Image (cartoon, rainbow, N blue to C red):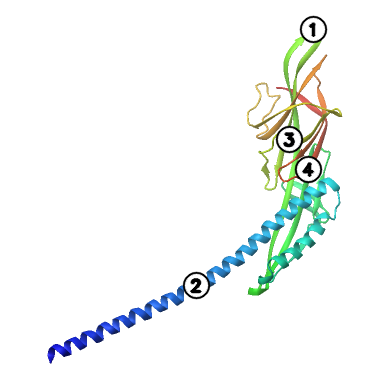
Amino acid sequence: MRLVRNKKGQFIIIAALLIAIMIISASAVMFSAVTYFRHERWEEYITVIDGVKAGTASVLQLSLGNYTRTWNSSVLKMNLDSWREDVKQAYAGFGAIIDYTLASGSYSVYGMSLNYNLGLASQNLSQVSFLAANVTIGLNITSVGLTGYRFTSAVFLKMNITDALWYQTKKTGQVVEGYIGVRVAIDMEGPAAVTNLVQNNFILFQIGGMNQTYTLRRYYDSQDHDDGDYPALNKFVYELRYFYSGTQVPTSVNARIGVQDTRSIRLTGQANSLSVIEA
């Protein structure tokens, strides 16, 4: 009889342990399911926010590119109106709604004073030329009560025609021959140097109003010239180098350069009486 009672006691203990394990396992599964659902939903909301940010940047780039071709100052506003409806439809299940405020008036950014109208600012045909677009977006996601989330999106492109270098190759009697390299620094928002342009990105190069055949060099200029007449720019530059032949080396040139970056934004700069320095 003692043996039987011991076996019953062991059975009760084992059964109790099994029940406890099942309860703990079920609780863990339920906790994992709840936290997984919560995590996954917030991941979706973050995806909505990131999608709106990326889409807004694309709208600004597209609008600035169109602006440089049409000079329609309302193009950014019209595209943002369309983008607002696209967001509402694309994220209908989340109740995503955006509003926007276009930059207006004078802003001091990138070390420059930019005068915005309907979110756009520009200065063309100057030695330092630029284009800019700026908007502040308000985002509400009504499905979770997210309201008042705001961010600013900006696109910027600047061209600085810095100087020109003279590379003499030979002199025959009264005729000198060589190459003149016009140097250009190009920046984007940040500001950060634009370093990935190739010759096809330079859609216009004129000297004295005449189109020139040229070769393109890209390099970071950080070394002073020996005689001190050619100071280091300490920045990334593009050098558009063309052949010159004449009775004397020109002391200055009039240069006009047009560039189209990889975002299809066009900018034209012009430098009058640009000093030519012996390289």
Classify mark 1: residues with Cα within 10 Å, few (<14), some (14-19) or many (20+). few
Farthest residue, direction bottom:
1
Residue 23's x, y, as percent?
37, 81
Residue at the spot of label 1: 173
Give whichever of discs 3 and 1 has the lower sequence position: 1
**Number of the front mark, 3 or 1:** 3
Q: CA distance from mark 1 to mark 2?
A: 87 Å
The reply to whether callout 2 and callout 4 are in contact (CB within 8 Å) is no
Residue 248's x, y, as percent?
81, 15
Farthest residue, direction top:
173
Give whichever of discs 1 and 2 has the lower sequence position: 2
Give whichever of discs 4 and 3 has the lower sequence position: 3
Q: Which mark is residue 266?
A: 4
The residue under label 1 is which amino acid type?
Gly
Residue at the image position 82 percent from the left and 35 percent from the top: 270
Callout 1: SS:
loop
The residue under label 4 is which amino acid type?
Arg
Q: CA distance from mark 4 to mark 1?
A: 43 Å
**Number of the front mark, 2 or 3:** 3
